[in-house]
Amino acid sequence: MWQWLKKWWKVISSPAKYLSLGLLTLGGFIAGVIFWGAFNTGMEFTNTETFCVSCHEDNVYQEIQGTIHFTNRTGVRAICSDCHVPHNWTDKMARKMQASKEVWAWLTGSISTPEKFEARRLHMAQREWNRMKVNDSLECRNCHEFSYMDFTQQSQRAMTQHSSSLADGSKTCIDCHKGIAHQLPDMKGVEGF
Ligand code: HEC
Ligand code: HEC
Ligand code: HEC
Ligand code: HEC
């Protein structure tokens, strides 16, 4: 028994001597694939609505159900991560790291009651608006593209606005479409409202 253990200990403690480099590389590669697979599965799961709703059930999830991005004539919809999680890998990672702070906020109950949620809402909304302003409403544009819009089929108001903002490019979707999926926060004192 001791002999056997000793033998294996030697193998484990100085692997390169006993195992060929090729085998080690292969082992490392397989471990990498497994890790990467598990990692990506985890990443995918954290993009599901089920995941987001597990914490946001009592606040935003209630309201979104009546909106165009939840039910509409054609049955195509947007889920939380479509609007809130970037597709680009680096940005996605950055957002996920940021989101780990949400777990902490959850544990400390920063939005655990409707009152607390409302009190924090403007602050949270402004962070999302800033994010979308900076990335030129990239998430909206993943689905809606000005160049494919048939302005002539839009309402007069939409047509006028869209062709003007198209022309000067100073405005982005979120400048005009705040509160598209959720009720607006209490906007008292906010510039422009
Ligand atoms: C573990 C619970 C939990 C999960 C899961 C969760 N959130 Fe949150 N989320 C929170 C808490 C708590 C806050 C409030 C953070 C604060 O007080 O700063 C928050 C805030 C937010 C905000 C405001 C952002 C900001 O910068 O203030 C957005 C947007 C958001 N969550 C979207 C999502 C989306 C989309 C998902 C799924 C991909 C998700 N959340 C999953 C707990 C969670
Ligand atoms: C995952 C795809 C997707 C994303 C992301 C998305 N939308 Fe939409 N949007 C849709 C679909 C689908 C409809 C409904 C089309 C229909 O009428 O059948 C829609 C409808 C709309 C409408 C029409 C509202 C109405 O009452 O007629 C507006 C405005 C809109 N979206 C703005 C936005 C903005 C602003 C964003 C970014 C914050 C955004 N969308 C993100 C897919 C998306
Ligand atoms: C300068 C302001 C402005 C900008 C910028 C803007 N919109 Fe609009 N949009 C409007 C107005 C106003 C309407 C009409 C709303 C209504 O009639 O209720 C509208 C309507 C829409 C509709 C519904 C069209 C219809 O007739 O059914 C969609 C979809 C939409 N916008 C998407 C977008 C997207 C995506 C972007 C960014 C690429 C964007 N908008 C940028 C002002 C704007
Ligand atoms: C069509 C795009 C879209 C979808 C889908 C969407 N959001 Fe949002 N969300 C926004 C925008 C834009 C804001 C910034 C505030 C605003 O304009 O209402 C926001 C703000 C928030 C906030 C900050 C508090 C607030 O109400 O302003 C939270 C939390 C949040 N979203 C969570 C979610 C969760 C969870 C889901 C899925 C159940 C979801 N969102 C689906 C676009 C979206």
Image (cartoon, helix red, strand yellow):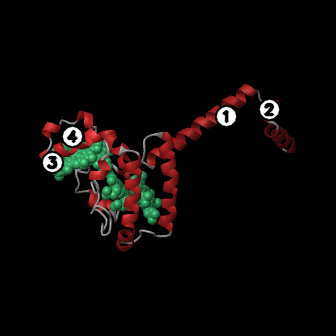
Q: Which label lies toward us, 1 or 3?
A: 3
In the rendered structure, which disc, 4 or 2, sits on the residue that comes first in sequence?
Answer: 2
Residue 163: image location, x then y, percent: 21, 40
Q: Which mark is residue 28?
A: 1
Residue 142 position, x and y percent, is 34, 39
Residue at position x 27%, y 61% from top?
63
Residue 85, given in percent of the width and then of the height, sits at: 42, 48
- At label 3, which amino acid type do we have? Arg
Q: Which residue is mark 3?
A: 157
Q: Residues within 10 Å of mark 1 (few under 14, many from 20)?
A: few
Look at label 1 and name its amino acid. Gly
Q: CA distance from mark 1 to mark 2?
A: 13 Å
Determine whether, in the image, residue 149 is placed left or right of residue 59: left
Tag 4: amino acid: Ser
Q: Earlier in the sequence, mark 4 or mark 1?
A: 1
Evaluate if marks 1 and 2 touch, with contact meaning CB atoms under 8 Å apart. no
Closer to the N terminus: mark 1 or mark 3? 1
Label placed on residue 163? 4
Relative vertical location of residue 49 with respect to residue 63 in this rendering, above or below: above
According to the picture, the residue beneath numbered tag 2 turns out to be 16
**Which residue, as the protein is rendered here, is positioned at the far bottom?**
115
The numbered mark, 1 or 2, whose residue comes first in the sequence reads 2
